Structure formats: C-alpha cells, structure tokens
C-alpha cells in the first residue's frame, strides 16, 4: 500500500521536478507489406499502421489518467523500410515515408520511426535508395524519423555510407529549412525532379549537367549496348544510381555496374581492362580523356540534368526577383564563368 509520504513525494516529482514518461512506443512489423508495386506498398503500410496502432494514443491517455504521470510522446517504430522495399521497383522511396506520415497523423501519434537502413555490413540497392530518399522524405513529412546505422563494434564503420549520409544530411538541411520557413533560398547545386517540386519552387535553369561515357579508343562499346558491358561509376552519384537501377526503370542492373570512390579510380580500372566504360560528368570526363592517352568519349550524351535554385514554396515575389537576377547574370557571362571555374576534374 502506498503511504501518504510516498504519494506526496510522487506529486512533488511531477509538479516540481517534472517527472514524466518520455515516450511509449509500439513496434509494428511491416514485412507483410512487401510489394514490388510502390503504390500497393504504400497502401499496405498505411493500412497496417492504422490498424495496429488504432488504440495506441487512447491507451497512453488511460495510463496517464490511472497513474497521474504525463506521457510526453506516443511513438510508432516499424521495420526498417529498406528491408521491406527491397522488391520495390521505384528509385524514390519518399511515397513510403508519406504513407507512414499519413498513418501517424491518422492515429494521432507524435513520431513514426523506421525510415531506416542497416548498412554497417554493407549496403544493398534498397539501402542506397533509402539513403538517397531521406532528404525529400523528411522535407515532405512532419512525423517521420529517419536513421541509418553505419557502424558497429564488431563490423566496424561503413565509410562509403558515412560519405553518402554526409551529402544527404547537407541536402536534408537545405530542403527542410526551406520547407519549414527557416530559409527562403536553397542554392546547393540542386537538380530539378518531381519529388523536390513537391516542397520547393524552382527558378529557371542556370546550368545543365551532362553525363557522358568514356571508353578506350577502338572499343566496341556504344550507347546502345551499354547494358551488355561492365560500367564504372563514382559511388553516390546520380550516374551510379541511374546505371545500377533495374532495366525496367531504364538502368542496366547492379550486376553491370561497379562503384568506385572517385572518377580517377574508375578511369584507372578502365585503362586496366577491369571495366568497359566509365559514366561520369562531362567536364571531368574531358579532363580525364585529355590526360590519358588511348581514351575517348562516346558520341552523344548519356543523360542530362538541369540545375536551378530552390525557392520557398509559394514565394512568387522572391522567385520572380531571383529569375530576373539570373537572367542578367547569364546574359553577361557571370554564370558561365562560375560553372567553368567550379567543375574541376576529381
């Protein structure tokens, strides 16, 4: 039985020392939600979270009422999304995060954790897709939490994942700052895509990124038979992402692509006969060809990407002002000078 002293002591802890239960968490397995179709996978994720967590918030409130101790957060934690999305054909996993966010709002929880990947022992294509999706996923949601486990005492640290996440954190900071009203402009070498258009408005294009293919002189490699060859790319780049994707999505499959730490190593592998070609940005490609006898560029462009400045959604006055300034800077050659100076071979 509780005595008067214990009751008063508990009241003092709650009232003066701010005793609380920081969070209650419901764990939900989403393994049954695996589906190659992204839309069906989203529907399954939303339905299962809503079904399993329907009474979570009410239960938390009942506990608060019974014991008189406030519960600060009600949270859901799900199976790492990279695991259930191994079969998903889409490159961008942001819609899965949006489905998680909708479900979290429907059941009334504060956070939904699990937009995650475990890459301490290496990363699969699904892991890479999840890491690449984190910036747009967090910019498009309110309650979703993301995490990537890049190391452990036994396995060590996956430094490739650390580098990829470092780039992702910078992009996340830029995108979420604009989406949350903490900044008005994002100038981080952004390429325009449909996912980013959901959270940002974009200026007119100020530069075009061109990716090309380096081969040995006399090689039988063509733009049409790349899917039959071994391709080298720098890891973490859009070239690597596009090329290693499935043939259904316009790629060549992971079996035909080798990732390297940088373009120079990929070029050395090409010279040594380990791969048949290198896909890389146009300016570094020209520098590598000029510096290495026996290499040449395939005629034509492998892919093009448009660069623009991101503007806080709905700020048309600022968008018009920046577009006006860009027009002047492009006309007088300032933008070309900046682009030429800051795209060195590396």
Image (spheres, rainbow, N blue to C red):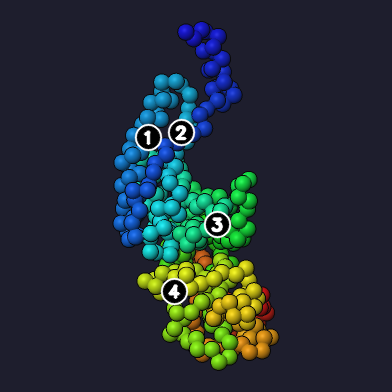
Depth order, front residue of 298/153: 153
| Callouts 3 and 1 close, C-beta under 8 Å | no
Residue depth check, mark 3 versus mark 2: number of the one nearer the observer = 3
| Callouts 3 and 4 close, C-beta under 8 Å | no
x and y, in percent, of residue 195 in the image: 43, 64
Residue under numbered circle 4: 252
Q: Earlier in the sequence, mark 1 or mark 2?
A: 2
From this view, report whether residue 187 is shown above or below residue 159: below
Whole-number angstrom distance, CA of label 4 to CA of label 2 = 45 Å
| Callouts 1 and 2 close, C-beta under 8 Å | yes
Q: Earlier in the sequence, mark 3 or mark 4?
A: 3
Depth order, front residue of 135/275: 275
Q: Which disc is residue 122 wearing?
A: 3
Query: How many numbered dots are placed on residues in this image?
Result: 4
x and y, in percent, of residue 324 in the image: 54, 77
Q: Residue at the spot x=63%, y=58% of the render?
A: 159
Q: Earlier in the sequence, mark 1 or mark 4?
A: 1
Mark 4 residue element: loop
């Amino acid at each position: 039985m509780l005595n008067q002293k214990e009751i008063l002591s508990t009241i003092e802890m709650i009232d003066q020392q701010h005793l609380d239960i920081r969070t209650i968490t419901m764990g939900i397995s989403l393994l049954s939600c695996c589906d190659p179709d992204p839309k069906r996978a989203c529907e399954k994720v939303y339905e299962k979270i809503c079904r399993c967590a329907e009474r979570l918030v009410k239960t938390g409130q009942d506990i608060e009422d019974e014991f008189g101790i406030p519960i600060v957060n009600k949270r859901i934690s799900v199976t790492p999304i990279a695991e259930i999305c191994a079969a998903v054909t889409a490159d961008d996993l942001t819609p899965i995060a949006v489905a998680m966010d909708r479900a979290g709002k429907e059941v009334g929880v504060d956070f939904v954790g699990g937009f995650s990947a475990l890459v301490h022992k290496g990363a699969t294509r699904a892991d890479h897709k999840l890491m690449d999706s984190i910036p747009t996923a967090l910019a498009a949601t309110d309650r979703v939490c993301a995490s990537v486990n890049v190391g452990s005492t036994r396995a060590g640290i996956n430094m490739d994942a650390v580098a990829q996440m470092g780039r992702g954190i910078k992009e996340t900071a830029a995108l979420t700052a604009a989406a949350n009203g903490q900044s008005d402009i994002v100038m981080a070498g952004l390429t325009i895509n449909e996912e980013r258009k959901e959270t940002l408005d974009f200026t007119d294009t100020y530069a075009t990124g061109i990716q090309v293919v380096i081969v040995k002189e006399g090689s039988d490699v063509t733009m049409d038979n790349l899917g039959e060859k071994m391709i080298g790319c720098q890891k973490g780049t859009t070239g690597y992402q596009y090329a290693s994707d499935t043939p259904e999505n316009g790629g060549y499959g992971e079996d035909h692509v080798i990732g390297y730490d940088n373009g120079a190593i990929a070029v050395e592998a090409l010279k040594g006969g380990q791969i048949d070609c290198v896909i890389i940005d146009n300016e570094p490609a020209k520098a590598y060809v000029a510096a290495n006898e026996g290499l040449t560029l395939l005629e034509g462009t492998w892919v093009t990407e448009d660069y623009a400045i991101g503007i806080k959604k709905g700020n048309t006055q600022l968008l018009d002002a920046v577009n006006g300034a860009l027009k002047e800077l492009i006309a007088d050659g300032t933008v070309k000078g900046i682009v030429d100076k800051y795209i060195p071979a590396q």
